[in-house]
Amino acid sequence: MSGLLITGALIYGEGEPVDVFIDEGEIRAIGTDLGVVDAEIVEADGQVLLPGFVDLHTHLREPGREDTETIESGSAAAALGGYTAVFAMANTNPVADSVVVTDHVWRRGQEVGLVDVHPVGAVTVGLAGKQLAEMGTMAAGVGGVRMFSDDGHCVYDPLIMRRALEYSNSLGVLIAQHAEEPRLTEGAVAHEGPTAARLGLAGWPRAAEESIVARDALLARDAGARVHICHASTEGTVELVRWAKSQGISITAEVTPHHLLLDDSRLETYDAVNRVNPPLREISDVEALRRALAEGVIDCVATDHAPHAEQDKCCEFAAARPGMLGLETALSIIVETLVRPGLLDWRGVARVMSERPAQIVGLDDQGRPIEVGEPANLTLVDPEVTWTVRAKELASISGNTPYAEMTLPAKVTATMLRGRITARDGVAARPQSVGGA
């Protein structure tokens, strides 16, 4: 058997169904009556074919917290969610602040083979914000680190951030900032507003995020460098990014699915599954973020997939670790919040979940057009189906999903990495390191 044949697919959800023939990792032919014989068949039956998704913000916890997630389990979750490339954040144990760790993450991802796992290097040693990490060494390593972030911590010292931006410019890499002024969030666990006040939860002001976004836009301008804003969460951040782009500043920003769907009314139950950093904001912020993503002010969707052990979430709200699962539910939430209301079509979904994130980090083989000669990194989506999220049925080791028992629209039915099926009908392929699919 040679190659893979997808039959009856709607490319970008448009036009009439066509067949797509894939061989040796590339799209070889698109049309009807292709005359292909002896190929593995994927029957699309009118489902939507999109470029494979790219996540710039994933926590895979390896090395150090393999009890909550591993590169293997996280890769399975990513493949089931339609992803063909993910960027694994640096806040592991040990921290990914050296080429030893970043190369390990890259190699382990390649061994598993379900998704390209790109390591994110730390900006500062130990995420401490005091001394720049060896960015050049990590960029030159086997892992080829192309994005650096202290995510989970803000690079709060403006001089350190300026130096990081200057070095990033010469290296051709990207600095991704966790925008949080720590002096404004000490002890904070929830969005500063009426809900937190009523519930007696320490408030987290919008200004903590927005002040860093404004500062870093100006630092990027002066350094002639690029800066990327992680998990934008406020209407003010939207307006600051809009202004910075209007000034010609090289700034990009991502938004998480949970900040597009959920708001701080979820905190009424004190359920720590809803604790996240930055916190769930008010509905006005949610609506502003949706509009900004549709308009292109916010560039892309990033999950901030953050697995946690049960003991780190089943506790009082203020003591819980912040973070939520996101890889397997991201597409459905984008459909619910943007496609169904008419803010995005399927071309728009491809833009914010595949094309723009790949462009931001310079992945030449991801987010590509679905055309002959292009890499076969693809995702097939059933737009008509609905499904109910069951935490125990997700591929992640952890179960801290805020969407448990929600019924969501649309479902990824197949994911292909360079023509290899990595997930199909809710089942991830076997990792290559244990014998292939």
Image (cartoon, helix red, strand yellow):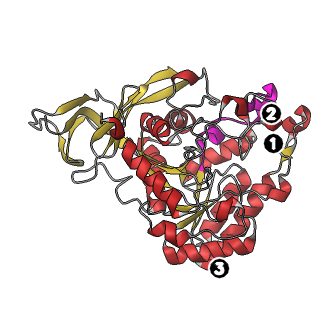
> Which element type, helix, strand or loop, lies under badge 2?
helix
Relative depth, front residue between 311 and 253 = 311
Task: Please name the residue that numbered disc 3 is placed on.
Answer: 222
Residue drawn at x 82%, y 37% is 318
Specify the principal SS of the magenta part.
Answer: helix
First in sequence: mark 3 vs mark 1: 1
Residue at (64, 31) in percent of width and height:
400
Q: Which residue is mark 2?
A: 317
- Pointer 2 and pointer 1: residues touching (CB < 8 Å)? yes
CB within 8 Å, label 2 to label 3:
no
Location of residue 394 in the rendering, given as x and y in whole percent from the top left corner: 52, 27
Determine which residue is flagged by label 1: 189
Count of marks overlaid on the render: 3
- For the N terminus, the image quarter is top left
The amino acid type, in three-letter code, at marker 3 is Asp
Q: Tell me: residue 383, above or below residue 64.
A: above
Residue 390, can we see it? no
The magenta stretch is 255-272
For label 3, count other residues whose C-alpha is less than 10 Å away and answer few (under 14), some (14-19) or many (20+).
few
Closer to the camera in the image, 342 or 331: 331
Task: Rate crowding at label 1 as few (under 14), some (14 to 19) or many (20 or more) other CA atoms within 10 Å.
Answer: many
Q: CA distance from mark 2 to mark 1?
A: 8 Å
Q: Residue 45: percent from the left, percent from the top?
A: 28, 26
| Separation of residues labelled 2 and 3 (CA atoms) | 41 Å
Going 60% across and 45% down the picture, which residue do you hit? 64
What's the distance in space between the residues labelled 3 and 1, CA to CA?
34 Å
N-terminal-most mark, 2 or 1? 1
Q: Secondary structure at mark 3?
A: helix
Q: Closer to the camera: disc 3 or disc 1?
A: 1
Secondary structure category for the residue under label 1: loop
